[in-house]
Amino acid sequence: MSTLIRDEDEVHVECDMDYSKYVINGVNYIPCTLRASELGRVMDILMNYVKSDQVLNQLMIRAVNDELRIDIPITITGSGKSPGEVINELIYLIIGIRHCLRTSR
């Protein structure tokens, strides 16, 4: 089994890269779990950004307890980004949003 694990500034992501095991509507996907400090504070801003982005809006994101479950369709590679790049973008979005919220207090 191949697992992508990223830890950056209190954001932890784990993805099972064996996408052959996961299919939704005929499309294989990579399931990921994301945990982050202050996730509740950034959710509205994060989701608005994700919905407006042509690549990120392909993700299926669900909040489950204190974490996000993210399904990345492998078709996302057709937009020019790898699943790892998509995860990095989400991580840095969360870090940036948290920073902005902290400095605007």
Image (tube, helix red, strand yellow):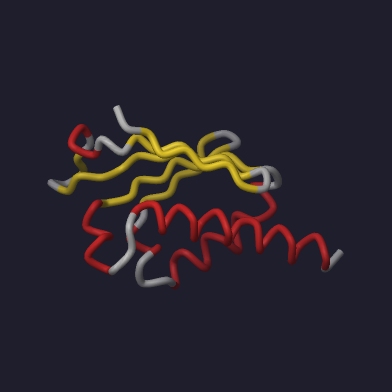
Toward the top, the furthest residue is 1
Residue projecting furthest to the left: 26
Side (left or right) of 41 relative to 62: right
Residue sitting farthest toward the right: 105
Could you say which is closer to the camera, residue 62 or residue 96?
96
Q: For residue 20, what is the image quadrant? A: top left
Viewer-proximal residue, 24 or 7? 7
Q: What residue appears at the point 29 percent right and 27 percent down from the top-left corner?
A: 1
- Compared with 85, 67 (above or below) is above
Q: Is 43 left or right of 101, judged from the image as shown?
A: left
Above or below: residue 56 compared with residue 65: below
Residue 15, horizontal then vertical, whole percent: 40, 38
Residue 70 is situated, as x and y percent measured from the top left of the image, at 41, 45
Relative to 78, residue 32 above or below: above
Q: Which residue shows up at 46% across the image and 64% down it?
A: 50
Image coords of residue 72 (percent x, y): 33, 50
Q: Residue at x 41, y 58 (%)?
A: 85
Q: Is the C terminus in the top left, top right, bottom left or bottom right quadrant?
A: bottom right
Tag count:
0
Q: Quadrant of residue 35 in the image?
A: top right
Q: Is residue 103 left or right of residue 40?
A: right
Residue 78 place in picture, x, y as percent = 22, 65
Q: Please, is residue 97 above or below residue 31 in the view?
A: below
Q: Quadrant of residue 55?
A: bottom left
